[in-house]
Image (cartoon, helix red, strand yellow):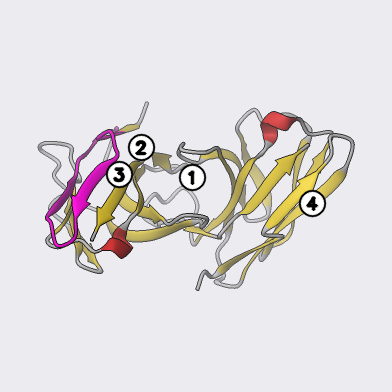
Amino acid sequence: GDSVTQMEGPVTLSEEAFLTINCTYTATGYPSLFWYVQYPGEGLQLLLKATKADDKGSNKGFEATYRKETTSFHLEKGSVQVSDSAVYFCALRSNTDKLIFGTGTRLQVFP
Amino acid sequence: DTEVTQTPKHLVMGMTNKKSLKCEQHMGHRAMYWYKQKAKKPPELMFVYSYEKLSINESVPSRFSPECPNSSLLNLHLHALQPEDSALYLCASSPRTGGGRSPLHFGNGTRLTVT
């Protein structure tokens, strides 16, 4: 079945450091890929999305590129802020109603 | 601001109580979802409603009973819950079903504690 694998956290960075959170997937067909962010005590917010190979999703300085050849959708940001501290979920949706989540990666950014 | 509104934000209930969680969206979405999220885990799908009909039930115990009165509203009725049911309950909606291209839009959740 479809699945998403994310790197284990927590990821701990200093402010202004470069961020990469790895995400790979297994799916039949051509899924859409998403990154969601969950701040403490809140629900999930859609951060960015990509619906086909080579698409690049971007939002709030975050980027991720849909790589079909490596089945990856890694999240990157050039300069993180303390306010980026949250849990990040990679997810995919194939031709069903289900959204498949990775296990989540906690990011902690210190001043 | 989230466009999916959930009430209440917090709920404490005993194991013999009956309570309901409510969810509302006004984006014209025709698919609505209930998820359960335990601490430090990803959300787990419970139910999906598509065009106001239950389309997916992920083998959820009968003490959880969903209801979709109309295309904008989704309820989750709770009865005789167990302490292990304590979790964050998230509602979500999506513009399409079975299409696979649309993201889900989540509410901020109801934090449920069963005592």
The amino acid marked with disc number 4 is: Ser
Residue on which disc 1 sits: A97
**Label 2 marks which chain's residue?**
A
Secondary structure under badge 4? strand
Image location (x, y in percent) of residue A33: 29, 49
| Image quadrant assignment for residue B66 | top right
Q: Residues within 10 Å of mark 2 (few under 14, many from 20)?
A: many
Q: CA distance from mark 4 to mark 1?
A: 24 Å
Q: Is residue B48 visible?
A: no
Q: Do badges 1 and 2 share one subunit?
A: yes
Report the front residue among B50 and B40: B40
The amino acid marked with disc number 3 is: Pro
Image location (x, y in percent) of residue A91: 35, 44
Residue at x-position 29% and y-position 37%: A9
Q: Is residue B1 magenta?
A: no
Disc with the residue nearer the chain's start (3 vs 2): 3
Q: CA distance from mark 1 to mark 2?
A: 17 Å
* Magenta region, residue range: A5-28
Q: Do badges 3 and 2 share one subunit?
A: yes
Residue on which disc 3 sits: A31
Q: Nearer the viewer, mark 4 or mark 1?
A: 4
Taking A56 as reference, is B19 above or below it? Answer: above
Q: Do badges 2 and 4 share one subunit?
A: no
